[in-house]
Amino acid sequence: MTLKRVRLFVVMAIAAIFLLAWVFPIIWSILNSLKTDQDVLAYPPKLMFSPTLEAYRDVLFGSAAILPNLISSFIISIGTTIITMLMAVPAAYALARLRFRGKRFAGFYVLATQMLPPVGIIIPYFLILRRIGWIDTYQGIILIYLSFSLPFAIWLLVSYFEDIPFEMEEAAYLDGATRLRTLWRIIIPQVRGGIAVTIVFVFLNAWNEFLFAVVLSGNTVRPVTVAMFNFVSVEQTLWAKLAAVSVLAMLPVVVLGIVAQKNIVKGLTVGAVKGGGRR
Amino acid sequence: MTAPGASAGEASGDLGRVLAQRERKFAMSLLAPAFLALLATTTFPLMFLIWTSTYRMDLAMPFADGFIGLENYRILLADERFWSSLLVSLIYTGSTVTLQVTLGLALALLVMDMKRGQGWFRLIAILPVVLSPAVVGMIWRTFMLAPEFGVVDYLAINAGLGSKNWLGDPLLAMISVIVIHTWQWTPFAFMVLLASLASLPEDIYEAARLDRATAWQRFRRITLPLLRPAIVMVVIMRTMVALTAFAAIFTVTAGGPGTATEILNLYAYRKSFTELSIGYGSALAVALLIVTIVISGLLFALRRAK
């Protein structure tokens, strides 16, 4: 009995350490965002302090405003999501439901594009966009984001399309409905949930992207992940403000992550489960 | 896949052919936008990249640009910084993936046995993985690792190790970026393996218990083999990501001090966009693609084996 108890205690202690380790850097950032710079830099680190929203005021409306960058991030992420979904839903339906020659190859192609290292895409893309003057534009960034959002969305959606029964489709055809009409009226409503989950993940991936954004952004279009990098330079670090920006940059994705909690494993492992498998 | 377009399959003769053709046309029109976009954003850049890699192309000295064939690759093979970045890549990838999988698996096994509190783990584990690696990198670089002000340094001082220059010392910097990556992605392995554990059949364990198998035997002989596909999948996915990690290192050390944490991916970036040698940078990116293909090929072979 006592041995069992000791074991239980050890297990709980290890578990608690993991939980704390995962949650601490996030909580610590939140705490620091509510401090003054002096409090952030206090030694030993301060757990008790008088909270202030000064840092948030500064980064939202003050001298170091990153509000335009937050808006940029939203425009890029929403733009990417809309265009991705418009292309991925029909493509995923075709891959999951229709019969045509080359289907196997098409599915493999979508998967294989993900093998390409992003740095190998951005080097040529930078040269092309520079020539046509699309550096520092929304269309430039959103276009290149399709390179990772499309394969992801297509594969995630295929798994949802495969789950709906064929009978519904057939009944619609027998009633004389066209294929497009059936897709729109019968099939799409069936995968609403899957489409919502896909939207969440596409938005999240676009929001978090950094490499393409660093290369392609300028003074007009600069998402928050890139803009906050300026808060830490060799000369000085704007401590409390950096914490506030971090929290603002984390907020949308944490909310979305918790909303999509039940589907997160599916979203994270999409493609891999099937890749190289039976299709 | 048995049923797609079953109606077309049942029809025979000319009608069947017409229907099949119509289905194909419909499929093509649905696929066209996505595939054109993928061609334009992945396949075309790849070809362009290979072409650029055969050029001397220097944004700082455009007058010297020109076709040089495989010269960039010849330089690459003799480039010490390339080999060192490849080694850093392998160390970074090998250690982060090993740590993620072992810690994730250990924790999944532990949490699986818990009667209460599983929900907390499932919730908390989401937090790191949804964050931008760029944000994670900056938080760690400042609030966790900054000398004296950083929490890690504070703990080190209190543990009697003294204040350390976590990101200024080559070895400590390497350990730091490995720990940061592991911190962010162990929850991924944990969640996937926990889901996989939860789906294992209960009755095998009953039988093993009746046979008086020890906990270790049950783990070694039952759990591990059953989890193997999930583990291999996690290893493959995480390896691909670690090989092309960018923000997680760039925002923390930018590859430094010197080139201590410069993985091949970062070297290709720095060469192209900091030193502006686009041609040679392209050759490095092609080398990275080849490394990626070789390693994933090995891992897929591992997946098929047994």
Image (tube, coloured by chain):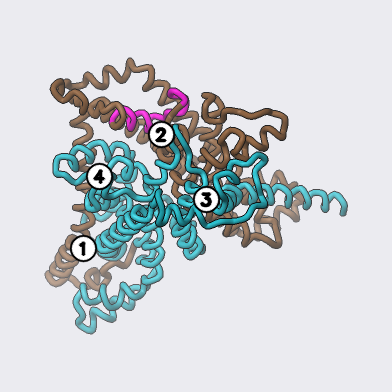
Letter of the brown chain? B
Q: Identify the secondary structure beneath mark 4.
A: helix
Residue to which mark 3 is pinned: B128
Magenta residues, start to end: B257-272
Residue to which mark 2 is pinned: B295
Question: Where residue B224 sits in the image (x, y, percent)?
Answer: 60, 46
Q: Which chain is mark 1 on?
A: B
Residue B30 is marked as 1
Q: Which chain is mark 2 on?
A: B
Q: Nearer the viewer, residue A174 or A186?
A: A186
Give the vertical position of A179 relative to A121 (above or below).
below
Q: Mark 3 vs mark 2: which is more N-terminal?
A: 3
Residue type pointed to by label 1: Leu
In the picture, which quadrant includes the N terminus of chain B?
bottom left
Give the vertical position of A42 relative to B271 (above or below).
below
Residue under the point 46% across and 32% down: B253
Determine which quarter of the picture holds residue B196: bottom right
Q: Count neighbours of disc 2 (C-alpha within 10 A) and say few if under 14, some if 14 to 19, many if 20 or more.
A: some
| Magenta-span inclusion, residue B7 | no
Q: Mark 3 vs mark 1: which is more N-terminal?
A: 1
